[in-house]
Amino acid sequence: MLTLKGKQIYLRALEADDLAFIHQIENDESIWEISNTITPYSKYLIKQYLDNAHKDVFEVKQLRLMICNTKEDKTLGMIDVFDFDFKNRRAGIGVLVKEIENRQKGYAKEALQLLTNYCFTHLDLHQLYCNISEDNTASISLFKNQGFKEIGLKKDWNFLKGHYKNEYLFQLINNNVH
């Protein structure tokens, strides 16, 4: 049985009633740097995205799952697989816990563990990668603690608020897959 449930959280597919939650996240300028966004998203566009969320990861090359607290059944954030490349058996991964008060509680760690396992066992991927801004120490720590290795520094990679920022590239190789 496929299980995307941990001790504190579970991961679930997108639902139509996630519209308001996703709309808030996608229009929060404080996190646009993470998603490389520079314009707001309308509810109409997000609804179209949700209407197509049932499509297979092999078709749309991405998968977004909601992170939910098992105790209160409350949506806490999202975790994404993006740039899904089955030929080369790799994909990018990103995670976001929305509210600051829900961060540093192990939710993102558990979500990352569950999704990494899913990617390696069910999607048969060989490697995962993530891109993290040099000043996002919490994410750097999270991914390093989950076995991701820093493999590069992209100098002056992102232009934000009048200056360039470096971005680290992290990678996790599944040595059990050839």
Image: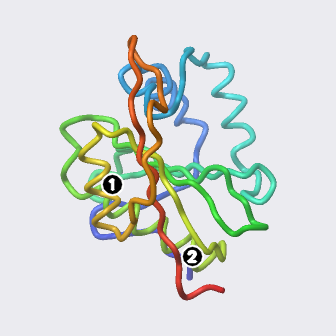
Q: Which residue is tagged 1? A: 108
SS at badge 1:
helix
Q: How many marks?
A: 2
Q: Residue 143 occupies which quadrant of the picture?
A: bottom left
Under mark 1, the amino acid is: Ala
Label of residue 174 in the image: none
Label 2 vs 1, first from the N-terminus? 1
Residue at x 63%, y 76% (from the top left corner):
122
Q: Which of 113 and 20 is in front in this view?
A: 113
Which colour style is shown? rainbow
Residue at x 24%, y 45% (from the top left corner):
137
Q: Which of 160 and 5 is in front in this view?
A: 160
In the rendering, at what x and y percent does residue 58 appear?
77, 60
Q: Which quadrant of the rendered structure holds the N terminus?
A: bottom right
Q: In this view, does 106 lie to the left or right of 18?
A: left
Residue at x 44%, y 37% (from the top left corner):
155
In the rendering, at what x and y percent does residue 26 appear?
50, 26
Q: Which residue is tagged 2? A: 120
> What distance separates the C-alpha of mark 2 from that of mark 1?
18 Å
Q: Which quadrant of the rendered structure holds the C terminus?
A: bottom right
Under mark 2, the amino acid is: Phe
Residue at x 75%, y 66% (from the top left corner):
86
Q: Is residue 160 above or below residue 85?
A: above
